[in-house]
Structure formats: C-alpha cells, structure tokens
Image: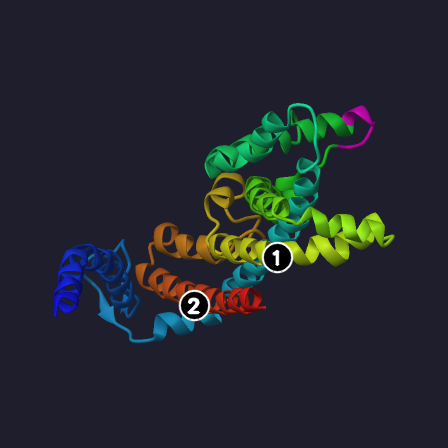
C-alpha cells in the first residue's frame, strides 16, 4: 500500500514537467500540421482556404525537393565520413604521450564550442574568400589561380565547414573509448607478433565500434537540420546546389511567404528525420547487445 502511495506521489510531482514538455512539443506540431492543410500566404492575410493534402503533393513533386533531399544526404554522408575517419586519426594521435597534451586536447576540441554562424563567417571571409582568403593566398604563392569555393563547389564548402565544427565532438567520444582499451590485450598481441596495422584493425577498431555508432547516431540527427552555415555562406545557391531540406522549408515559408507549403515541408522533414533516427537507434541497440 505504501509503495502504491509513493508511486502516485512521484507521478503527481513529475506530471507538471511532463505536461509542460508535451505542450511544448505537441502544440507547435499541431499548429504546423494545421497550417500544412491550408493555402496560407503571408502576403494575403485572411484569405486562407482549406486544401487538404495538396501542399504535401506539391512539395513532394517539386524538383527543388529532390535536389534538396539529395544535397541533404550528400551533406550528412560527407560530414560523417570526414568526422569519423578524422576523429579516429586524431583520437589515436591525442592518445599518445606528448608535451602539452592537455593544451593540445583543448585546442582540438575548441571548434565545437564556436557558434555555427561565427564559424561559417570565419570560413567564408578568412579562408574561402577568392580575393583575400587564406586558400587564395596559398594558391597565389604556388602560382595557381585562386578557386572560388563557395561559387563553384558550394556543397563541398558546406561539408568542410560543418565537418570542421563536428570533428572535435567525434574526436572526444572516440578518444574516451580509446582510453578504455585494455592495454594487456595490446601487449599480448605484440607478444604474438602482431604489427601496428593488425592491432588497429583487429583490436582497436572493434573496441571503438560502439563509440563510432554513437557518433554516427548523434551527428546524423543534428546534421539533418543544418541551416546556419548554408544561410551565412551560400544562401542555398547557386540555384539549389547547396539547398538542403531545412533550408528549402525556410525558403518556402519566409522567402516565398508560403506558410502552407513550408509547413508541409516541415512535417515531411520531421517524418524523414524520425525514420532515420529509428533506424539508427535500432542499429545502436544491436551494436550494444553484440
């Protein structure tokens, strides 16, 4: 009886937080679903009409959607490839004894704490500027013509900027996993004549597999909604070459004032993100059970 009373008391105390959290999530989601069923343009207030699923049809059949979906996938896969491989290499490097090891680790992790808008501005003006940027100066030193990254390789530029920001996160997680590796196992492998590459592929890498899976899961969820870097550097262009799903929804809602179409795009983006998240969570669960 006392246990039941304790449970009821605990639920009663927790309920305000749960109700607030649900309201915080469900009310905006419900309003977005409602707007997605309307023909609603901000330039014509008071003329909203019910359209049903027409906004979803137009969004899914718009050529910009397929370009944005492709760019989103390329962006996520490109950043994951750079951060996972680079994170493993940096983790292996930082795990070695060196002078000033603590300071080096802080410097490597520091970019993760830079705001996306700030990092995008730094890359745009200090590194990728075709006139005064660092890359242009290096090209001139070697007698080459400076390359305008943001104009001729916009999506690659976005991948580079985002990967620079997320590489410290991957490094930190993978370094933590690497430091939990049993050194007795490594010494036993050395006594059996295993080389550096053999130890890495058969001992170190399998030991880091769970951490790699966690990095992929967390980063993918956040990378699906990359926005600030695109807005600051390329504004989705040229054309739709660097437009992802999140930027396409922003463009429809706030640049073209089509709230109905933008809301439908937002719901579709949420559905796609949840499908990816469910798949990745299951993958993580299987990895942890192994």
Q: Residue at x 77, y 32 (%)?
A: 145
* Predominant secondary structure, magenta span: loop
Per the rendering, the mark at residue 77 is: 1
242 or 281: nearer the viewer: 281
Q: Residue at x 42, y 70 (%)?
A: 58
**Side (left or right) of 110 relative to 84:** left
Image vertical order of residue 59 relative to residue 246, above or below? below
Residue neighbourhood size for the residue with mark 2, other residues' Cα within 10 Å, grouped as few (<14), some (14–19), many (≥20): many
Q: Position of residue 93 (x, y in %)?
A: 70, 38
Q: Which residues are magenta?
A: 140-145
Task: Say which element carries label 2.
Answer: helix
Q: Position of residue 17 (x, y in %)?
A: 20, 54
Q: Residue at x 29, y 76 (%)?
A: 52
Labels 1 and 2: the sequence-earlier one: 2
Q: Which residue is mark 2?
A: 59
**Side (left or right) of 73 relative to 10:** right
170 magenta-colored: no
């Amino acid at each position: 009886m006392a246990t039941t009373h304790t449970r009821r008391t605990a639920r009663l105390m927790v309920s305000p937080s749960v109700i607030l959290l649900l309201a915080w999530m469900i009310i905006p989601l419900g309003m977005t679903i409602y707007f997605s069923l309307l023909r609603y343009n901000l330039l014509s207030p008071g003329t909203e009409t019910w359209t049903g699923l027409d906004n979803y049809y137009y969004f899914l059949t718009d050529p910009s959607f397929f370009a944005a979906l492709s760019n989103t996938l390329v962006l996520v896969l490109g950043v994951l490839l750079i951060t996972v491989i680079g994170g493993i290499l940096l983790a292996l490097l930082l795990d070695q004894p060196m002078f000033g090891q603590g300071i080096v680790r802080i410097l490597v992790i520091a970019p993760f704490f830079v705001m996306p808008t700030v990092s995008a501005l730094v890359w745009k003006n200090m590194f990728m500027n075709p006139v005064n940027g660092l890359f242009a100066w290096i090209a001139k030193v070697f007698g080459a013509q400076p390359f305008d990254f943001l104009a001729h390789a916009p999506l690659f530029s976005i991948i580079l900027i985002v990967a620079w920001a997320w590489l410290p996160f991957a490094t930190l997680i993978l370094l933590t996993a690497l430091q939990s590796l049993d050194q007795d196992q490594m010494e036993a492998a050395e006594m059996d004549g295993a080389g550096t590459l053999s130890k890495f592929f058969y001992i170190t890498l399998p030991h880091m597999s769970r951490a790699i899976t966690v990095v992929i899961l967390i980063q993918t969820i956040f990378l699906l909604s990359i926005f600030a870097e695109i807005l600051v550097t390329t504004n989705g262009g040229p054309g739709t070459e660097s437009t992802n799903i999140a930027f396409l929804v922003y463009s429809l809602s706030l640049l073209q004032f089509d709230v109905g179409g933008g809301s439908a795009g937002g719901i579709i983006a949420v559905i796609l993100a949840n499908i990816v998240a469910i798949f990745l969570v299951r993958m993580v669960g299987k990895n942890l059970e192994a």
